[in-house]
Image: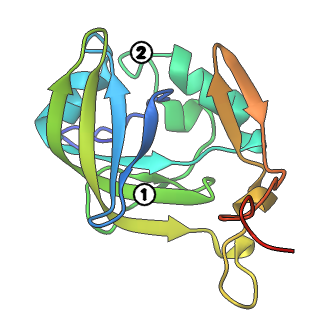
Amino acid sequence: MADREGRSNIITIAWAGTVCTNPPMVSISVRPERYSYPILKETGEFVINLTTKELAFATDYCGVKSGRDVDKFKEMNLTPVPATHVKAPMIGESPVCMECRVTQVLPLGSHDMFLAEVLAVHADEKYMDEKRKFHLENAEPIVYSHGAYLACGEQLGTFGYSVKKN
C-alpha cells in the first residue's frame, strides 16, 4: 500500500480471502491500531501479493516490523513495482499480485474487514505453461495458521473429483 504522499508500506495479512467471482472481490481484515489501517481507510486501495516459501522470512518480518519505523521494501530487498490501477506498489518477487479498491469497511470487533473489488491480477510468466495455465504450486506458496507458516502446493484433487465416475 502507499499513503497519499506515495510512501509505500507492506503489511502481512493473516485474514484474507475470496468473496465473489463476478465482480471479482476479496476481503482483508486489519486491526485499527495497525500502522497501515489509516492508510487503507484514507486511500481505499491496496495490493495483495501472494507469498512463497522463498518469501517466508520477508513475510514474517513485514508482519512484525512497523512501517512507522522501517522501510520494509529496503530492509527485505524487495522490489516495488508500479501497479496499473492503484498507487500502491506490487512486490516484484511475488508470483501473483492483485490490485484492489475498497468498496466497504465492516467493523467486526478486533479487526475491520475491508471488502474490495479486484481491478487487475498480475501473474509471473515463469509459472505459466504453454497453454497459458498458471501453476501456483511451482511457486511454493505458503499459508499462515495459528502462528505458523506452512508450505503447501500438493494437489489433492480437482473441482468435482469427489463425484466423478470412474
Q: Residue at x 66, y 34 (%)?
A: 143
Q: Quadrant of residue 126?
A: bottom right
Q: Position of residue 14 (x, y in %)?
A: 51, 27
The disc label shown at residue 20, or none: none
Report whether residue 127 is seen: yes
Q: Which residue is mark 1?
A: 98
State the residue in front, 40 or 147: 147
Q: Position of residue 44 (x, y in %)?
A: 17, 43
**Residue depth check, mark 2 versus mark 1: number of the one nearer the observer:** 1
State the residue in front, 82 or 139: 139
Q: Quadrant of residue 34?
A: top left
Q: Give the CA distance from mark 2 to mark 1.
A: 26 Å
Q: Is residue 18 left or right of residue 78?
A: left
Q: Residue at x 64, y 22 (%)?
A: 145
Q: Position of residue 31 (x, y in %)?
A: 32, 15
Which amino acid does the dot numbered 2 rest on? Asp
Q: Which residue is mark 2?
A: 69
Q: Residue at x 16, y 32 (%)?
A: 105
Question: Among all residues in the image, which is located at the extreme front?
Answer: 165
Which amino acid does the dot numbered 1 rest on? Met
Q: Residue at x 62, y 34 (%)?
A: 76
Q: Secondary structure at mark 2?
A: loop
Q: Residues within 10 Å of mark 2 (few under 14, many from 20)?
A: few
Report whether residue 4 is seen: no
